[in-house]
Amino acid sequence: MKPAAKDTDEYISDFPKDIQEKLHLIRRTIRQAAPDAVECINYGIPTFKIHGNLVHFAAYKTHFGFYPGASAIVEFKKELALFNTAKGTVQFPLDKPLPLKMILDIVIFRLDENMRKAKPVKKKK
């Protein structure tokens, strides 16, 4: 069994070039929506965090997994109707164009959600 990637670059480099290109597109789209988010590997896949987990993404044999959490799946139910979804996940087929605008909108939604949930910083007196 291969050890988990140490970072997103290493994760992406393990895939064929055509899949790498699409993973880079997903990554750039997330970064565009959340430029201050921190990248890491969590659950063995690329993750963006800001005030907690923001989104995760991954590549598999037949699809890209995008993991924005259950609230985003509910919020974007109509837009996601063409894709396989579960409680907190959506699958984008490898052989179809990525819905980058939708990914951007979902990340913006999740960023707003995380920012609202963040605890306010107490000011020192």
Image (cartoon, grey):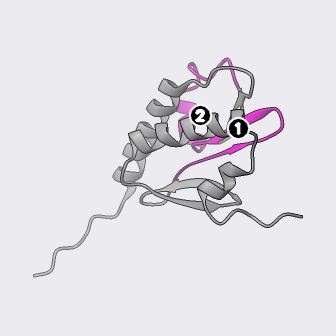
Looking at the picture, how far across and down is residue 100, in whole percent?
Answer: 52, 27
Question: Residues under labels 1 and 2: Cα distance?
Answer: 29 Å
- Which element is circle 2 on? helix
Asked if the magenta segment contains residue 64, the reply would be yes
Q: Looking at the rendered structure, which numbered label has been put on residue 49?
A: none
Q: In this view, does 48 lie to the left or right of 82?
A: left
Residue designated by label 1: 17
Give me the residue at 61% from left, 62% from top. 7
The residue at 44%/44% (across/down) is 31
Q: How many labels does the image show?
A: 2
Amino acid type shown at disc 1:
Lys
Region in magenta: 54-83
Residue 86 visible, this angle? no
Query: Which quadrant holds the N terminus?
Result: bottom right
In the rendered image, residue 81 lying in the magenta stretch gets the answer yes
Which residue was labeled with disc 2? 73
Residue 17 in the figure: left or right of residue 72: right
Farthest residue to the front: give it: 17
Q: Nearer the viewer, residue 12 or 108?
A: 12
In the shown orientation, is residue 24 left or right of residue 1? Answer: left
Q: Quadrant of the C terminus?
A: bottom left
Crowding at mark 1 (Cα within 10 Å: few <14, some 14-19, many 20+): few
Image: 50 above or below 55: below
Q: Considering depth in this image, is 26 or 54 the residue closer to the camera?
A: 26
Q: In this view, does 114 lie above or below 44?
A: above
Q: Where is residue 73 in the image (x, y as percent from the top left)?
A: 59, 34
Q: Measured from the top left, where is residue 121 in percent x and y?
A: 25, 69
